[in-house]
Every structure is written in structure tokens, then in C-alpha cells.
Image (tube, grey):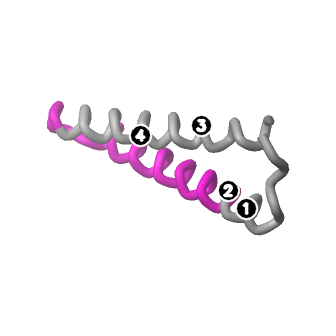
Amino acid sequence: MANLSQIELQNLRHLIGAHETTYQKLNTYATQAVDPQIKQIFTKSAQDALNTKQKLMSFLNN
């Protein structure tokens, strides 16, 4: 993969941070949810955010 420009790197860091924040919030909501269906939705959404963050981070490792 080609080297990232400074702007691309900044955008990537911003997206990674946003997905980390989303993961943390959804994970907190999942632990506080009483309804099992709502808990499951928050848990899956949190996992999706974490997966996306990890995929974005892979661009930094190349």
C-alpha cells in the first residue's frame, strides 16, 4: 500500500477515535440495558464499531 499523506493520516486517526468512542458508549449502554433485545442490539453494535476500528488501524500497520 502507498504511504498515507498527512491529511489521510489525520482523517484515519479521527475515524479510529470516533469508532473507539462509539464502541465505549455502546458497550456502556449494553451493560446498563435491562431489556435483553436492547442489550443484544447495543452489544452487536459495539462489536461492529470495534471491528471497524481494528480494520482502520490495520492501515497504520502497513
Residue found at x 79% / y 36%: 61
User: Does the CB distance between marks 1 and 2 fall below 8 Å?
Assistant: yes
Q: Provide the secondary structure element on which disc 3 rests.
A: helix
Q: Which labelled disc corresponds to residue 55?
A: 3
Are the two marked residues, 4 and 1, in contact with CB atoms closer than 8 angstroms? no
Q: Is residue 13 left or right of residue 6?
A: left
Residue 15 to residue 33: above or below: below
Residue at 59% across, 37% down: 55
Foreground residue among 6 and 2:
2
Q: How busy is the neighbourhood of tag 4: few (under 14 within 10 Å), some, or many (20 plus)?
A: many
Label 3 – label 2 distance at C-alpha? 11 Å
Three-letter code for the amino acid on which mark 2 is drawn? Leu
* Span colored in magenta: 13-37
Q: Alpha-carbon distance for marks 4 and 1? A: 25 Å
Q: In front: mark 3 or mark 1?
A: 1
Counting residues from the start of the chain, the first of labels 3 and 2 encountered is 2
Which amino acid does the dot numbered 1 rest on?
A: Glu
- The residue carrying mark 4 is 46
Foreground label between 1 and 2? 1
Q: Secondary structure at mark 1?
A: helix
Kind of residue at disc 3? Lys
Chain-order first, disc 4 or disc 1: 1
User: Which of the two discs, 4 and 1, sits closer to the camera?
Assistant: 1
Q: CA distance from mark 1 to mark 2?
A: 6 Å
**Element type where label 4 sits in the image:** helix
Specify the label residue 8 is tagged with. 1
The label number, if any, that marks residue 45 in the structure image = none
User: In 3D space, how far apart are the residues under numbered discs 3 and 1 (Cα atoms)?
Assistant: 15 Å
Between marks 4 and 2 in the image, the one whose residue lies nearer the viewer: 2
State the mark number for residue 12. 2
Instruction: Determine crowd level at label 1: few under 14, some 14-19, many 20+ residues with C-alpha closer than 10 A.
Output: few
Q: Residue placed at 80% from the left, 54% from the top?
A: 4
